Image (cartoon, rainbow, N blue to C red):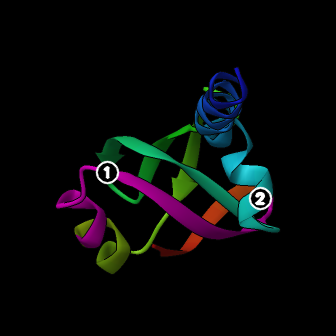
Amino acid sequence: MFRGIVFSIILLLLFLSPVYACESAGTNVHVGEVTAISAGTFTLLDAETGSPIEFTASSELLLTLAGLQRTIAVDYSEEQGRLVALAVR
């Protein structure tokens, strides 16, 4: 009985952890998967909300993203109503 409860709690935590990915990642950080890359921007499918988020990014950052096919964290700032990606990890 006790093992069943512990197992259920572990499963619950594993399934809930992506929901809180952005919130627990810190201030001005979004976590998710890149769904599109275009000239000067990329779109991230946010792990917390499931919504697409568009970031402006430098050419160097976009080249880094081109080879990634995994969940990433984006450090960003907000400038004139736009999200500007500063770094990815």
Residue labelled with disc 1? 70
- Magenta run includes residue 17: no
Residue labelled with disc 2? 24
Where is residue 72 drawn, in percent x and y?
Answer: 45, 58
Residue nearest the viewer, comparing 59 with 22: 22
Where is residue 13 drawn, in percent x and y?
Answer: 68, 38
Residue 29 visible to an observer of this rendering: yes
Q: Kindly give the residue lying farthest to the front in the view shown.
A: 1
Residue nearest the viewer, comparing 47 with 9: 9
Where does the magenta region start and end?
64-80
Q: Residue at x 60, y 30 (%)?
A: 7
- Classify 7 as above or below 25: above
Q: Which mark is residue 4?
A: none
| Circle 2: element type | helix
Mark toward the start of the polypeptide (1 vs 2): 2
Left or right: 57 in relation to 85:
left
Where is residue 52 drawn, in percent x and y?
Answer: 56, 32
Residue type at mark 2? Ser
| Circle 1: element type | loop
Q: Residue at x 32, y 74 (%)?
A: 59
Label 2 neighbour load within 10 Å: few <14, some 14-19, many 20+: few
Quadrant housing the C terminus:
bottom left
Q: Residue at x 32, y 66 (%)?
A: 62
